[in-house]
Image: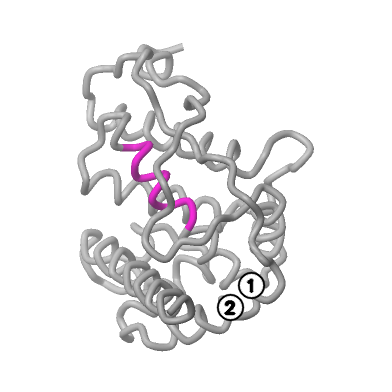
Amino acid sequence: MSAITAAIPRRPTPRAPGPGPGARPVDPARQAQLLAAVAAGHGTAAFVELFNYFAPRLKAYMKRLGANDSLADELTQDVMVTVWRKAGAYDPAKSAVSSWIFTIARHQRIDALRRERRRALNPDEPLLWPEEMPPPDATLQATQRARRVRAALDTLSREQRAVVHLAFFDGKSHAEIASSLAIPLGTVKSRMRLAFEHIREALGGDDARAAA
């Protein structure tokens, strides 16, 4: 086992920040339903709900593992792309959805450390973990949220829709998207980040109006 691999614990301690703006609590059973929908190929809205819940937690986790803000954003995107592409590999008999996603995150951080050739992290560094949340009113909220997600996707720019489609419908990596569109890799990552920021803002705005 390498020093980098040994330096990152396999499980974070069970603490986490609160949900990001506009994010609703997603209980473990709901997480499994959403991931199953993604695996079945019917999960654009389901994936965005997972993204909206896990992205701020993954970013916080990466930052506690030493990533700066930009790298934490990039690694979070990479983790969630992997979740989309490999949703069918998830086995609920082996782990909870959150454990599976954070295992992917840990591997992404190890790979990034190897690429960057940075010093290994302190294995005793406290890490973040999603807290248990009460279940939402699943059926009605999921239907309403799916409509808002579709509406938000329709408002993306042509360039943003292109990278989202190639990543989540064609299963291409960021590098493959850059090659397909003949644009720099950094532009692909920027458009992907802006697209999800736009979607989160749209969902957050709707949630705020619904609560008013």
- Comparing 3 with 43, the one in front is 43
Question: Quick check: 176 left or right of 31?
Answer: left
Q: Name the residue tied to disc 2.
A: 146
Q: Name the residue tied to disc 1.
A: 142
Q: Quadrant of residue 66?
A: top left
Residue at 42% across / 47% down in the picture?
Answer: 18
Which of the numbered marks, if any, corresponds to residue 56? none
Mark 2 is surrounded, within 10 Å at the Cα level, by few (under 14), some (14 to 19) or many (20 or more) other residues, namely: some
Residue at 67% across / 69% down in the picture?
Answer: 41
Q: Main secondary structure of the magenta part?
A: helix
The x and y percentages for residue 13 are 48, 25
- What kind of colouring is applied to the model shown? one colour
Is 139 located above or below residue 101 in the figure? below
The x and y percentages for residue 53 are 49, 55
Judged from the image, the secondary structure of the residue bearing numbered disc 2 is helix
Q: Quadrant of residue 188?
A: bottom left
Judged from the image, the secondary structure of the residue bearing numbered disc 1 is helix
What amino acid does circle 1 point to?
Ala
Give the mark count. 2
Looking at the image, the residue that sits furthest to the right is: 93
Mark 1 is surrounded, within 10 Å at the Cα level, by few (under 14), some (14 to 19) or many (20 or more) other residues, namely: some
The x and y percentages for residue 143 are 65, 78
- Tag 1 and tag 2, C-beta contact below 8 Å: yes
The x and y percentages for residue 133 are 59, 47
Residue at 66% across / 47% down in the picture?
Answer: 28
Q: Is residue 67 magenta?
A: no
Looking at the image, the residue that sits furthest to the front is: 212
What residue range appears in magenta?
53-62
Question: Quick check: 6 left or right of 121?
Answer: right
